[in-house]
Image (cartoon, rainbow, N blue to C red):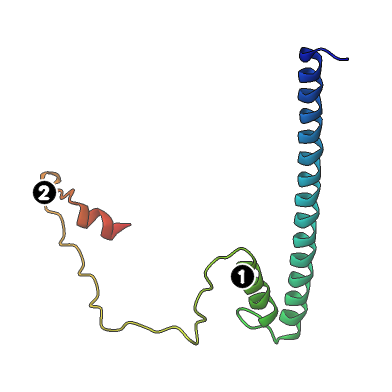
Amino acid sequence: MPSEPESAAAAFTRAGQDAVTFSRRVAGTALARTERHRNENRELLKEFGRQRIAGGAAATPSALRGAAQRFRRARGLPLPVAPAEAVTDRGTPPVPADPPRTSEEDEDFSQLRIMRQA
């Protein structure tokens, strides 16, 4: 009959081996997923290039847009509004230009001015 310290050591070793096995499985899955995404992106770029050479390429081809939407849905990310569906806000007045500085002592370090320049 094994003594108590031996069984604890065996359990610790087994837990370590299980963790290594799990991490290798997860890493392999991640590498396979990454390779699949790279291949999909490569194919999409080839398709985009063929369309562009043929003169029929749009700014965002439907294949690329569809792939982006599938990617965002799969990860639970918000889907952006398509440009055709976007609502433009023309009621916002333009930001007035800053008055010219007259001297170095006249510098305005207020948050509003710093935020407008960013």
Q: Is residue 22 left or right of residue 117?
A: right
What residue does disc 2 label?
A: 106
Q: Amino acid at mark 2?
A: Asp
At x 71% / y 80%, what residue is drawn? 52
Label 2 element class: helix
Q: Percent from the top left, x then y, of residue 42?
A: 77, 65
User: Label 2 crowding class (10 Å Cα cut-off): few <14, some 14-19, many 20+?
Assistant: few
Q: Closest to the observer: 110 or 89?
A: 89
Q: Is residue 27 above or below residue 116?
A: above
Q: Position of residue 80 (x, y in %)?
A: 51, 74
The C terminus lies in which quarter of the figure? bottom left
Whole-percent x, y for residue 43 in the image: 79, 70
Which of the two discs, 2 and 1, labels the residue nearer the N terminus? 1
Residue identifier under label 1: 73
Q: Residue at x 81, y 12 (%)?
A: 3
Among the 4 quarters of the image, the one containing residue 59: bottom right
